[in-house]
Image (cartoon, rainbow, N blue to C red):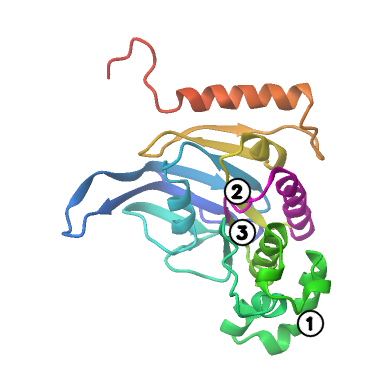
């Protein structure tokens, strides 16, 4: 078995997942039945690529993102950003959750500044706060508190808070899942605009097939738990994408069929 080649300068924002397994132990140190969350997962994501992961609930999608963020470690296997092993959290890898997780006692401006304050960078980067508020269209709400914001606005604050640290990689764990359909579509365009503006490598977990097709360069389909990669589908559709086009609908049907059979043995296969 040959390990992947070291990353060059050009692909320093690439992600590599190499034969990763994740097994959760019980409190007594033993192994809980069904605790194998991920089983031998390997994936490469090029610098500047936007890749979505879809799959059944509980298949390890969020677990994989948390490992890439450095919040938990794999049982076996390796994770890397460029040539650097991932062993701990880093500002180079931003993580955006479904819940914006804003601090309710801080204004929009202060919420966006949080990462800069934690890193001791606020004084030299203060001008960027205004830039990112304009970028996500929230400059008029700089002094508003989270309870004054709609769900879409709060999620834009969360995105700005992650992007202001200039991460090489942005990990998004169903960031639009709690929004209504119309706001969700607007926010999909917002994320795409930010991605195209900054060229950030993005890994996007979603349960929404249309969202994955609309946004992604490639779609990773995972099996039921324990999660394995069933298939990786390139999305060769021109941007901006037409959700009602025949090519879009055909790809949607193919993915839905794959998800229906993901992880199931072939007919006649008793193993």
The circle on residue 227 is none
Instruction: Select label 1 or label 2 by which is in front.
Output: 2
The range drawn in magenta is 172-198
What is the CA distance from the residue labelled 3 to the residue labelled 2? 17 Å
The residue lying furthest to the bottom in this view is 123
Identify the residue under disc 1.
127
Residue 218 visible, this angle: yes
Does 259 appear in magenta? no
Mark 2 and mark 1 in contact (Cβ < 8 Å)?
no
Identify the residue under disc 3.
170
Return the disc, 3 or 2, that comes first in the chain's sequence: 3
Query: Element under label 3?
Result: strand
Query: Element under label 1?
Result: helix
Residue at x-position 62% and y-position 35%: 209
Does 193 appear in magenta? yes
Q: Is residue 235 left or right of residue 173?
A: right
Q: Residues within 10 Å of mark 3 (few under 14, many from 20)?
A: many
Q: What secondary structure is the stretch in magenta mostly built from?
A: helix
Residue 3 visible, this angle: no
The circle on residue 177 is 2
The residue lying furthest to the front in this view is 147
């Amino acid at each position: 078995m040959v390990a992947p080649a070291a990353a060059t300068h050009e692909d320093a924002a690439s992600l590599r997942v190499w034969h990763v397994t994740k097994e959760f132990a019980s409190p007594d140190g033993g192994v809980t039945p069904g605790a194998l969350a991920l089983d031998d997962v390997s994936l490469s994501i090029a610098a500047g690529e936007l890749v979505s992961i879809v799959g059944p609930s509980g298949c390890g999608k969020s677990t994989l993102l948390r490992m890439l963020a450095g919040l938990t470690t794999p049982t076996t296997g390796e994770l890397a950003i460029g040539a650097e092993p991932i062993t701990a959290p880093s500002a180079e890898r931003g993580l955006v959750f479904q819940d914006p997780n804003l601090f309710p006692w801080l204004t929009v401006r202060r919420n966006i500044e949080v990462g800069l304050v934690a890193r001791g960078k606020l004084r030299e980067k203060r001008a960027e706060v205004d830039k990112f508020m304009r970028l996500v269209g929230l400059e008029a709400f700089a002094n508003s508190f989270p309870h004054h914001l709609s769900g879409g606005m709060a999620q834009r604050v969360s995105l700005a808070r992650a992007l202001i640290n200039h991460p090489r990689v942005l990990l998004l764990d169903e960031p639009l899942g709690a929004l209504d359909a119309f706001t969700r579509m607007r926010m999909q365009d917002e994320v795409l605009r930010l991605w195209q503006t900054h060229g950030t490598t993005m890994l996007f977990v979603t349960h929404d097939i249309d969202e994955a097709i609309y946004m992604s360069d490639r779609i990773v389909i995972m099996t039921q738990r324990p999660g394995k990669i069933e298939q990786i589908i390139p999305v060769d559709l021109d941007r901006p994408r037409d959700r009602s086009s025949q090519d879009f609908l055909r790809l949607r049907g193919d993915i839905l069929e794959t998800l229906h059979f993901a992880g199931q043995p072939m007919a006649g296969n008793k193993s």
